[in-house]
Image (tube, grey):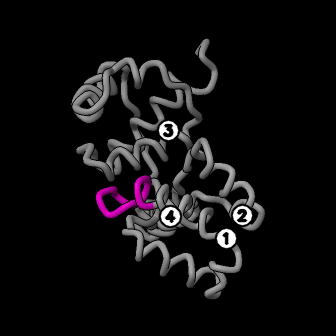
């Protein structure tokens, strides 16, 4: 029986895809630059894996674009993009983890347990209305919750997954749930 349990646990862990960040596109001039110069070839979610200063962003972008950044962007576009990157994903921010794979859970939170956890882990920074009014899919709740944990929310992997399941069930994309 123990031999059968090991492959099941391993396949559950490695069968899940790693959680990826989801970056909300900015507004204004930087949005125009990103739509014109970046998203025609790739998304912007990978930016969230970094927390770099301006020189770090220049080095990363040059490396990813085979040292052709100057030929791809005007000086104004380059400065606009770098200004946004260093504010949104600068050294004072916390990079999204590259390695979070959701563990399998077999028990689930009751409303009281989930409310206690959100009270402990979320309301230190957010009003509870912000959590109660949001409507996301479980995958989006996972991204938000992992991001909040990286920013300081005290929550274990198992608590995170139980909370994601509960949030998806009670505060999913259907506001009439």
**What's the CA distance linking mark 3 and mark 2?**
29 Å
Label number found at residue 37: 2
Q: Nearer the viewer, residue 31 or 128?
A: 31
**What's the CA distance linking mark 3 and mark 4?**
29 Å
**Which residue is pictured at 62% across the width and 26% down the height?**
173
Secondary structure of the magenta portion, mostly? loop
**What's the CA distance linking mark 1 and mark 3?**
35 Å
**Which residue is pictured at 37% across the width and 20% down the height?**
111
Q: Which residues are magenta?
A: 86-96
Q: Is residue 115 magenta?
A: no
**What's the CA distance linking mark 2 and mark 4?**
13 Å
Residue at far right of view:
40
Residue 167, placed above or below residue 39: above
Label number found at residue 73: 1
Badge 3 vs badge 2, beta-carbon distance below 8 Å: no
Residue 137, placed above or below residue 9: above
In x, y percent, where is residue 143? Answer: 49, 47
Which label's residue is closer to the chain start, 1 or 3? 1
| Quadrant of the image containing the N terminus | bottom left
Residue 125, placed above or below residue 134: below
| Whether residue 63 is visible | yes
**What's the CA distance linking mark 2 and mark 1?**
7 Å
Which label's residue is closer to the chain start, 2 or 4? 2
Q: Is residue 74 left or right of residue 11?
A: right
Residue located beneath label 4 in the image: 82
């Amino acid at each position: 029986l123990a031999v059968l349990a090991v492959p099941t646990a391993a396949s559950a862990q490695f069968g899940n895809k790693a959680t990826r960040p989801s970056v909300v596109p900015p507004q204004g001039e930087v949005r125009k630059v990103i739509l014109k110069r970046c998203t025609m070839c790739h998304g912007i979610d990978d930016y969230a894996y970094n927390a770099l200063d301006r020189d770090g962003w220049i080095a990363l972008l040059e490396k990813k674009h085979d040292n052709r950044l100057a030929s791809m962007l005007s000086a104004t576009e380059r400065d606009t993009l770098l200004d946004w990157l260093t504010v949104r994903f600068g050294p004072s921010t916390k990079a999204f983890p590259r390695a979070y794979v959701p563990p399998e859970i077999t028990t689930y939170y009751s409303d009281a347990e989930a409310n206690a956890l959100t009270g402990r882990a979320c309301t230190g920074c957010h009003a509870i209305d912000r959590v109660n009014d949001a409507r996301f899919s479980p995958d989006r709740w996972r991204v938000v919750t992992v991001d909040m944990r990286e920013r300081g929310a005290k929550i274990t992997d198992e608590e995170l997954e139980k909370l994601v399941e509960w949030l998806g069930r009670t505060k999913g994309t259907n506001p009439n749930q």
